[in-house]
Image (cartoon, coloured by chain):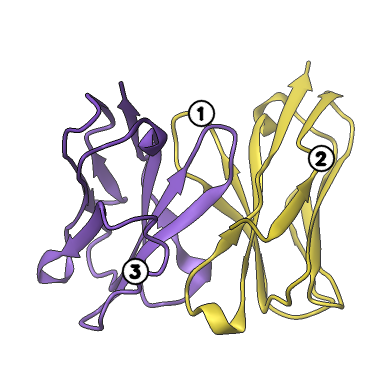
Amino acid sequence: GAGVSQSPSNKVTEKGKDVELRCDPISGHTALYWYRQSLGQGLEFLIYFQGNSAPDKSGLPSDRFSAERTGGSVSTLTIQRTQQEDSAVYLCASSPTGGANHYTFGSGTRLTVV
Amino acid sequence: GQQLNQSPQSMFIQEGEDVSMNCTSSSIFNTWLWYKQDPGEGPVLLIALYKAGELTSNGRLTAQFGITRKDSFLNISASIPSDVGIYFCAGRRETSGSRLTFGEGTQLTVNP
């Protein structure tokens, strides 16, 4: 597609359930990023994929969070045993290479844990 | 944790007024970026700065990369209602690869 596509756009889940958030980057973009935006806050880095290199997972807040990128394209962010503090907007971005000036963000998935 | 201090947190202005917002850090950044986020959307890049002292304009927007490499400002001249939104600064440090650090945002409201 023309832009970064994220699904679902909204997700309400019960505390303790697992959730999967999906990101389709711009075709041909080798770099993919996940950020989290809590209410009234800036964006918090979670994880970064670049080509076939090992991902930079240094921003994942706990071992309940994981992400994978299949075939160098679609990425899935999984949160296990969700907690209320996981409620946030999860934003995915992609760029042609690792250059930060070319980030294109998706519209995000708003996750609400009840 | 958050390493960029962005101010002000919010601004309420009249249409036609000029606006200024800034970001400061205790760390040195080699790239400064300014984004705008509309409700329900992801941030959109407005201006990118790559050199200390660089002053760049994009229409009514002007941004500067501070000479100490620890700060940046964004000015919006002659504001219009569609300028409403949240403005974020973001920086990239030499040691952080492609990871960006974001400020907490400035919520701008423009009264017609």
Closer to the camera in the image, A102 or B40:
B40
Q: Colour of chain A?
A: purple
Identify whether B91 is placed above or below A42. Answer: below
Q: CA distance from mark 2 to mark 3?
A: 31 Å
Q: Where is mark 3, residue-wise?
A: A57
Q: Are marks 2 and 1 on the same chain?
A: yes
**Where's residue A25, x and y in %?**
26, 57
The N terminus of chain B lies in which quarter of the figure? Answer: bottom right
SS label for mark 3: loop
Q: Where is mark 2, residue-wise?
A: B8
Q: Where is mark 1, residue-wise?
A: B39
Identify whether A38 is placed above or below B2. Answer: above
Determine if residue B64 is in view: no
**Where's residue B22, x and y in %?**
81, 53
Q: Residue at x 44, y 36 (%)?
A: B41
Closer to the camera in the image, A64 or A76:
A64
Q: Is residue B104 left or right of residue B111?
A: left
**Where's residue A55, x and y in %?**
29, 74
Disc 1 marks which amino acid? Pro
Q: Which chain is yellow?
A: B
